[in-house]
């Protein structure tokens, strides 16, 4: 599953990423403690677990259409794909195995027999074919076309120039052959691998399906739990799927519950919530609770502050960097040097994390060393000097700079509400910029709730100028899906032909005999130097995720990709 598909906003969001398991290298430990389990008590039969989350969910319960961690948290219990990711963060067979032809141009997938949808219908390769067609449909408005674009004929089908996708051939109910447009090193990590229930969706169009009852009210999957009740934006009850292909789950049910993040500690302490990625500003106290197994894991995600470079041209399918406001590189560098990220992490994240200067966390084999890049250390005087050199000077003596043309220069900042410290965090950023003479303010005077926040960003609201966001990444460091100029989730709308070229080069097989991993590492080092210097966004921090797990819950596996092995979860009471 391509988890970089998460578009998550604000500093509190996102799990999932790409840990580092380079061939021949050391394995990275995914948790500081063993997954939570009780050594004294034995599990009981059945029972239920409450999984907490601190933001409302949209309720788009289809992997082909969902956009945020809010819905992904539900989907992870009810559905899964052809492949999974192991502890070394390498793709491996799950619902299907695969073979690649000698010329690297054809994939053959073999599906497990007897896997059933929640309504009892058998999963077949027609469901996988349907998912590829759905995402390539001309009326599909989701952001995942990049995950089918490598299939021969998918672009022509999307453009309405063909009535079928040439590269897809269903051989039998359990076998499908896929012809690619070109060889790609990480095709298994990139190709869409989540089937959709063709029989259940019927003739609903790709455009209408996202709002259909089959996705919003009565979704189905093939996972260990199936949806039984949805209270929109508040909770989802999932009950055991007795026909799950890996065996009947141990729990009777999982309840996904939205909670007030400010009350997280009390809810965990009194047992209302069994499992939650805990608010970092409460972690010091939560981690000491007697009924909690406290687990931390290096997060394969990063937070950032985005500059608004322009807009996304939906007709042409490309970003257009037509906003001139932040085109001056010295201005962007100055705004980065103005931020004391170490103090921010210590104050608002209980020290869980560290400053980051590129879009790869340090646990990735593709991460460049800090000695090769600008680390944008906190330096107010340097920031002021860079502003001055860029022509941003305080000409009227009011304490704030004017732009090079002598006009007032203001900067709107957007962030998301929801946590107890949300307002304080946003004010920290705004005041840091004010300290160097930039008249920064919170856009509209108030933070936005979860849904409004990223709806506003995605729709290129002209009032948005800078914003705090975060990304969760896939197990492969390929930046496509977020950073290409054709990516809808290139939220900062930065166009760079050089960046596009390097991203594409990173998944092409080397022609000079260079080792594949060495080739990719060299390309990604060059790409990181580019984005570090150009700074289309301010890379803010790499994160460490804290999980609070009630001691009555056993066999919860926590990794940089979140929680796992849901069918093995059990309770002792």
Image (spheres, rainbow, N blue to C red):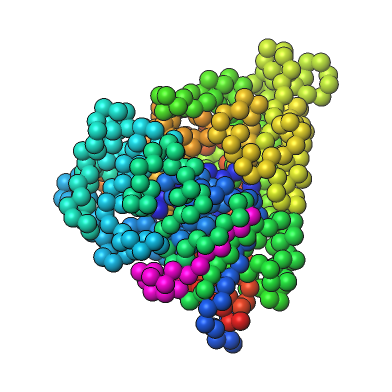
Q: Quadrant of residue 384?
A: top right
Name which residue lies at 75% across and 37% down.
446
Q: Position of residue 401 (x, y in %)?
A: 75, 22
Specify whether 454 is left or right of 222: right
Q: Is residue 306 above or below residue 281?
A: above
Residue extent of the magenta highlight = 234-249
Specify whether 501 is left or right of 535: left
Name which residue lies at 27% across and 41% down.
151
570 and 416: which one is in front? 570
Q: Is residue 557 above or below residue 111?
A: below
Q: Is residue 502 above or below residue 212?
A: above
237 and 378: which one is in front? 237
As drawn, the residue found furthest toward the right would be 398
Q: How many marks?
A: 0
455 and 383: which one is in front? 455
Magenta stretch: helix, strand or loop mostly: loop
- Confirm whether the magenta stretch covers residue 236: yes
Q: Position of residue 338 (x, y in %)?
A: 70, 36
- Confirm whether the magenta stretch covers residue 141: no
Specify whether 160 is left or right of 407: left
Q: Is residue 393 visible?
A: no
């Amino acid at each position: 599953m391509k988890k970089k598909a998460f578009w998550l906003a604000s500093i509190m969001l996102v799990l999932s990423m790409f840990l580092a398991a380079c061939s021949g290298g050391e394995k990275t430990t995914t948790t500081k403690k063993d997954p939570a389990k009780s050594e004294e008590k034995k599990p009981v039969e059945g029972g239920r677990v409450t999984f907490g989350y601190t933001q409302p969910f949209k309720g788009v319960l289809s992997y082909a259409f969902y956009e945020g961690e809010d819905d992904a948290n539900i989907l992870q219990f009810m559905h899964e794909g052809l492949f999974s990711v192991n502890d070394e963060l390498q793709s491996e067979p799950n619902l299907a195995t695969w073979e690649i032809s000698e010329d690297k141009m054809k994939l053959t997938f073999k599906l497990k027999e007897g896997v059933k949808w929640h309504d009892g219908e058998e999963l077949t390769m027609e469901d996988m074919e349907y998912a590829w067609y759905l995402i390539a449909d001309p009326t599909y408005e989701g952001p995942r076309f990049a995950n089918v674009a490598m299939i021969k004929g998918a672009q022509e089908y999307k453009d309405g120039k063909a009535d079928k996708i040439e590269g897809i051939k269903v051989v039998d109910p359990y076998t499908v052959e896929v012809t690619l447009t070109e060889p790609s090193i990480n095709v298994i990590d990139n190709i869409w691998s989540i089937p959709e229930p063709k029989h259940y969706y019927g003739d609903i169009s790709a455009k209408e399906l996202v709002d259909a009852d089959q996705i919003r009210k009565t979704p189905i999957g093939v996972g260990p739990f199936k949806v039984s009740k949805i209270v929109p934006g508040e909770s989802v009850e999932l009950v055991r799927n007795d026909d799950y292909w890996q065996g009947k789950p141990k729990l009777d049910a999982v309840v996904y519950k939205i909670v007030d993040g400010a009350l997280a500690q009390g809810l965990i302490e009194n047992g209302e919530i069994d499992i939650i990625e805990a608010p970092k500003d409460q972690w010091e106290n939560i981690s000491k609770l007697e009924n909690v197994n406290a687990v931390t894991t290096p997060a394969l995600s990063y937070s950032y502050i985005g500059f608004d470079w322009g807009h996304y041209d939906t007709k042409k399918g490309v970003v257009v960097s037509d906003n001139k406001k932040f085109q001056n590189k010295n201005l962007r560098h100055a705004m980065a040097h103005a931020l004391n990220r170490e103090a921010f992490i210590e104050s608002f994240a209980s020290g869980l994390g560290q400053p980051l200067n590129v879009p790869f966390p340090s646990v990735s084999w593709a991460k460049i060393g800090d000695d090769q890049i600008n680390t944008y250390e906190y330096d107010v005087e340097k920031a002021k000097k860079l502003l001055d050199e860029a022509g941003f000077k305080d000409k009227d003596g009011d304490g704030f700079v004017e732009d090079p043309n002598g006009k007032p220069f203001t900067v709107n900042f957007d962030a998301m509400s929801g946590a107890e410290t949300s307002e304080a965090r946003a004010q920290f950023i705004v005041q840091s910029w004010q300290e160097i003479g930039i008249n920064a303010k919170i856009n509209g005077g108030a933070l936005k709730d979860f849904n409004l926040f990223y709806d506003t960003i995605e729709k290129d609201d002209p009032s948005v100028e800078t914003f705090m966001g975060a990304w969760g990444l896939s197990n492969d460091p390929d930046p496509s899906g977020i950073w290409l100029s054709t990516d809808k989730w290139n939220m900062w709308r930065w166009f760079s032909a050089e960046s596009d070229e390097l991203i594409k080069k990173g998944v092409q097989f080397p022609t000079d005999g260079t080792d594949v991993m060495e080739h990719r590492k060299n390309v990604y080092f060059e790409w990181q130097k580019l984005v570090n210097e150009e700074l289309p966004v301010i890379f803010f921090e790499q994160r460490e995720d804290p999980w609070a797990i009630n001691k009555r819950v056993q066999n919860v596996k926590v990794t940089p990709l979140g929680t796992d092995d849901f069918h093995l979860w059990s309770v002792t009471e």
